[in-house]
Amino acid sequence: MRGKTNRFPGVTGWDVALAVVFLAVAALIWVLLLRPHTVASKAEIKLNGVLIGTYELSEDSEFTVTNGDHANTVVISDGEIYVKSANCPDQYCVKHAAVKHSGECIVCLPAKLVITVTGGEEGPVDAYTG
Amino acid sequence: MRTQAEKVAFCGVLTALAVILSYVESLIPINLGVPGIKPGFANIIAVFVLFSYGLGTAAVISGIRVVIVAALFGSPASALYALSGAAASLIVMALLKKAGRFSVYGTSMAGGVVHNAAQLLVAMLVTGTPLLVSYLPVLILAGMVTGIVIGIIAQLLISRLSGFVRRV
């Protein structure tokens, strides 16, 4: 930086190229994962990456999933599923909007809880969920 | 050339500033529906130190900041994410800086993107959910925006404090 007095040294062509690459990658992933918004029929609940239960979205219910000290209260209502309350510090899972479209998910990282909604019309979802 | 003690003292002030910036940020509720999007004000310090003192000093300050913030306001889990994001972004920013072809803005932009991508990768590994990759496009965009803003602020600091940094 020695000798530079300009407060806003110019943006280089390389900066712009890098921005274009990032945008292209974002667009590519977005297009690859683009899927018709089919309404899901089931919710799969995973703890530590292991499937612990599958729930029908057509049946309203409320239950609590515990993992060690972590407890997340999950509600299924009107074909949607959401986390009503959790004792994790960040509360991202509680703030997350209710999900109902196939392939959407809610994650609680501290509790290592993943709620994925699937089923309904067959979509390209299975192609990448493996 | 002044003493090493002066540099240590200045870096201590910067570390404290980074901790405070993390804390202030945690007070601002941001909910865009996608977890993990936040301004990352503390990265202003990381970018400034990287360009003023180099990777080693930046790594030490960021590492101490992450540990202190996790101990005071977070959890071991939050430390894991913060550390992976900070480490990955610092390494990439150091490489871009070394390449010598990118401005502070471009370097910081890449840092923001890599920061988010690394945290998402850790989240995918921890939860065993490859599906989380669907968050990546929006996290890339968010990382670009926050990275550029942070780069602009950091560049102002670098310009205004360059005389001070050279003396210290």
Image: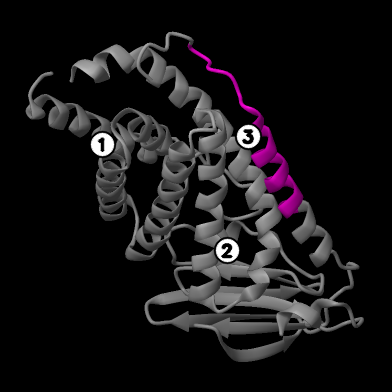
Category of crowding for the residue at label 2, using alpha-carbon neighbours closer than 10 angstroms: few (below 14), some (14–19), many (at least 20): many
Residue B144 place in picture, x, y as percent: 62, 40
Number of the label disc, if any, that sits on residue A14? 3
Q: Is residue A116 magenta?
A: no
Category of crowding for the residue at label 1, using alpha-carbon neighbours closer than 10 angstroms: few (below 14), some (14–19), many (at least 20): many
Q: Is residue B36 above or below residue B151?
A: below
Residue B92 place in picture, x, y as percent: 47, 48
Q: Secondary structure at mark 1?
A: helix
Q: Nearer the viewer, residue B65 or A102?
A: B65
Q: Are marks 2 and 1 on the same chain?
A: no
Q: Is residue B72 left or right of residue A112?
A: left
Q: Nearer the viewer, residue B14 or B70?
A: B14
Tell me which amino acid carries mark 1.
Thr
Residue under pointer 1:
B15
Residue under pointer 2:
A93
Q: Secondary structure at mark 3?
A: helix
Q: Is residue A14 magenta?
A: yes
Could you tell me if the residues under marks 3 and 2 are in contact, i.e. CB atoms within 8 Å? no
Q: Secondary structure at mark 2?
A: helix
Q: Is residue A82 in view from this perspective?
A: no
Q: Which residues are magenta?
A: A7-26
Could you tell me if the residues under marks 2 and 1 are in contact, i.e. CB atoms within 8 Å? no
Q: Are marks 3 and 1 on the same chain?
A: no
Mark 2 belongs to chain: A
Q: Is residue A73 left or right of residue A77?
A: left
